[in-house]
Amino acid sequence: MKLKIAVQKSGRLYEDSLRLLKECGITIANGGNKLKAEAANFPIEVYFLRDDDIPQYVEDGVADIGIAGENVVYEKRKQVDVQEKLGFGKCRLSIAVSKNETFSQPWLNGKRIATSYPVLLQQYLDKQNISAEIHEISGSVEIAPGIGLADAICDLVSSGSTLLTNGLKEVETILFSQAVLISSKELSSEKENLVQKLLFRIRAVQKARNNKYVLLNAPDNKLEDIIKLLPGMKSPTVLPLATKGWSSVHSVLQEDDFWDIIEQLKAAGAEGILVVPIEKMII
Ligand code: ATP
Ligand code: ZN
């Protein structure tokens, strides 16, 4: 018995999806060219599909789990469980208008909006009490205003450079999206166990990615101040250095407050600060 996972065949999610599996100890021999690949060291089969089709395959149980963007998962409104945000494929679904437009709501009332995300856009418009005309198009949405097909667009944005080159500006965000792990609602208990096993690994990898291992040297008379700055998993490790009156302090810091704390540590007398990536973190 093998768990079947659907991942994007090629595109923005492909590499990160395979990298995540690899970091979870699941290695797949040269995937991309094939429809299907097997892992050597975990009972899993990988199916390579178009991202838009992944929620459907998981709903139908053709795949047990899948990796897709939240934008696709919510647009398709399939009956699947969202198990975990995966921290990559980050983008936003935004409304953009010509950069010369002075925009403030209810500007969109009565306008034509081109998008590949009619469901999410309609939900947003309903919530805002705006009535606008939705033009569903499947690709190159960003050229629609320029050719007179629409007054505005609703499309995925990450850096915003595509908007810029098309003379558009982002005015409203309707969804912040990232890749998620979805699962079928009808898994056997055996498969459910495998999903939990995989999720345990994914969480350990994600936690590790968000944390750094920090080592520093400190004079013993400054230790108390320095330890106060460090959270650690339980509390920091303190080891004596060969030089009398000095200690080495080890701890784990979150990426988010990392630079702040490093500055404070230096100010408190820490020296020789080393920062090391963590591969897996289990708490
Ligand atoms: P496929 O052939 O699989 O249908 P695609 O062209 O629809 O590919 P990609 O452009 O590879 O898909 O995007 C896949 C997913 O990557 C998107 O659904 C979205 O979740 C995410 N993504 C992240 N940043 C962006 C971005 N700037 N533009 C589009 N998608 C993005
Ligand atoms: Zn697609």
Image (tube, rainbow, N blue to C red):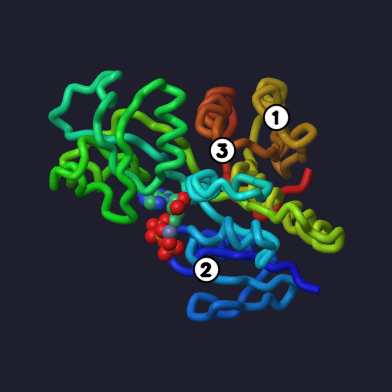
Residue, disc 2:
49
Q: Residue at x 28, y 24 (%)?
A: 109
Q: Position of residue 256 (x, y in %)?
A: 55, 33
Relative to 121, does residue 47 appear above or below in the rendering?
below
Residue, disc 3:
255
Of pointers 3 and 1, the one earlier in the residue sequence: 1
Residue, disc 1:
231
- Which residue type does callout 2 highlight? Leu
Front residue of 215 and 82: 82
Crowd around label 1: few <14 · some 14–19 · many ≥20 (10 Å): few
Q: Is disc 3 in contact with disc 2, using a CB cutoff of under 8 Å?
A: no
- Measure how far apart labels 3 and 1 are at the Cα level: 13 Å
Front residue of 260 and 141: 141
Q: Residue furthest right?
A: 189
Q: Residue at x 32, y 39 (%)?
A: 134
- Which residue type does callout 1 highlight? Pro
- Which residue type does callout 3 highlight? Glu
Crowd around label 2: few <14 · some 14–19 · many ≥20 (10 Å): many
Q: Is residue 85 left or right of residue 122?
A: right
Q: Residue at x 58, y 23 (%)?
A: 268
Note whether ligand 1 is within 8 Å of mark 2. Answer: yes
